[in-house]
Amino acid sequence: MSIRASIGMVIASLLMISCSLSTEAELARCTLVLPDLTLVNAEYVLKDEESEPIAIQAAEISLFDKTNTANLSRLTFTQRDGEGTILVSGRADAAVANTKEWDAQLSGNVEITDYRNDFVITADELSWLHTQQLITAPANQLVTIVYTNDKRVEGYGLDGNLKNSTFTFDRIVSGAFSL
C-alpha cells in the first residue's frame, strides 16, 4: 500500500471519529434542549395527597424529563375544593415549573386570586413554593394586593404565605391595612 493511501485512510478515520463524537455530543446537548413531550392547548392536572388538585390550561406545555422541568406559555390555573368551589385561580404569560416539587417561576402579567380570603395579587414576576404554599417576588419587583373591600397595598419584595394569608414587603409604596 502506498504512503498516500495510508495517509488518506488515517485522515478519513480521524474525520469519521471526529464526526461521530460531534454527533454524539450534539445528540446529548439536544436531549437537554429539546422537550421530551410538548402539549398544545392542553390541560394538566396536578394532585398530591395534601391539597386539592390544580388544573392548569396552557397554550403550550413542554416537558423535559431529564431536568424535571416544564415550560408553560399563556397559562391559567384553578384549584377547586371537593364540592367544586373555586379556592384559587390565576394566570401568567409564562412559567417554568419543577415537575417533581411543583415549584414554579411565573412571569408576565401574573395574577393570583384567593377566593377564600378575598384578595388578588398582581405582579410581573412571582415564585411559588408548593409544599410551603409560599409566594415571593424579588426586591426590585412591584407587587399589588387588592382586597375585595377596596383595601390595596403595593410594595417591593413580597414574601407571602397563602396558608394563613400573611404577607410582608421589603418596602411598601402605598396602601394601609388595618383590622
Image: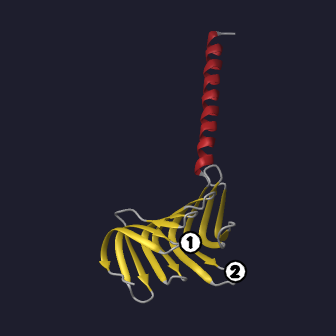
Q: Which amino acid, by three-letter code, is at mark 2?
A: Gly
Report the residue at 39% width, 69% height from top: 168
Considering the numbered disc 1 on the image, is that residue within a helix, a strand or a loop? strand
Q: Which of 20 and 29 is in front in this view?
A: 29
Looking at the image, residue 179 sits to the left or right of residue 8; the answer is left
Q: Which amino acid, by three-letter code, is at mark 1?
A: Leu
Report the residue at 66% width, 73% height from top: 52
Horizontal and vertical percent for residue 100? 63, 57
Outermost residue, front direction?
A: 179
Horizontal and vertical percent for residue 73? 55, 67
Outermost residue, bottom direction?
A: 149
Q: How many labels does the image show?
A: 2
Q: Which of 5 and 169 is in front in this view?
A: 169
Q: How is the image coloured?
A: secondary structure
Looking at the image, residue 153 sits to the left or right of residue 117; the answer is left
In which quarter of the view is residue 12 placed? Answer: top right
Looking at the image, residue 140 sits to the left or right of residue 17; the answer is left
Report the Cα–Cα distance between label 2 and label 1.
23 Å
Outermost residue, top direction?
A: 2
Quadrant containing the N terminus is top right
Q: Nearer the viewer, residue 172 or 19?
A: 172
In which quarter of the view is residue 142 placed? Answer: bottom left
Residue placed under numbered mark 2 in the picture:
82
Report the residue at 42% width, 89% height from top: 149
Mark 2 or mark 1: whose residue is earlier in sequence: 1
When the figure is inspected, residue 15 is found, relative to residue 6, above or below; the finding is below
Report the residue at 70% width, 80% height from top: 82
Residue placed under numbered mark 1 in the picture:
75
Point out the frontmost of discs 2 and 1: 2
Horizontal and vertical percent for residue 165? 48, 75
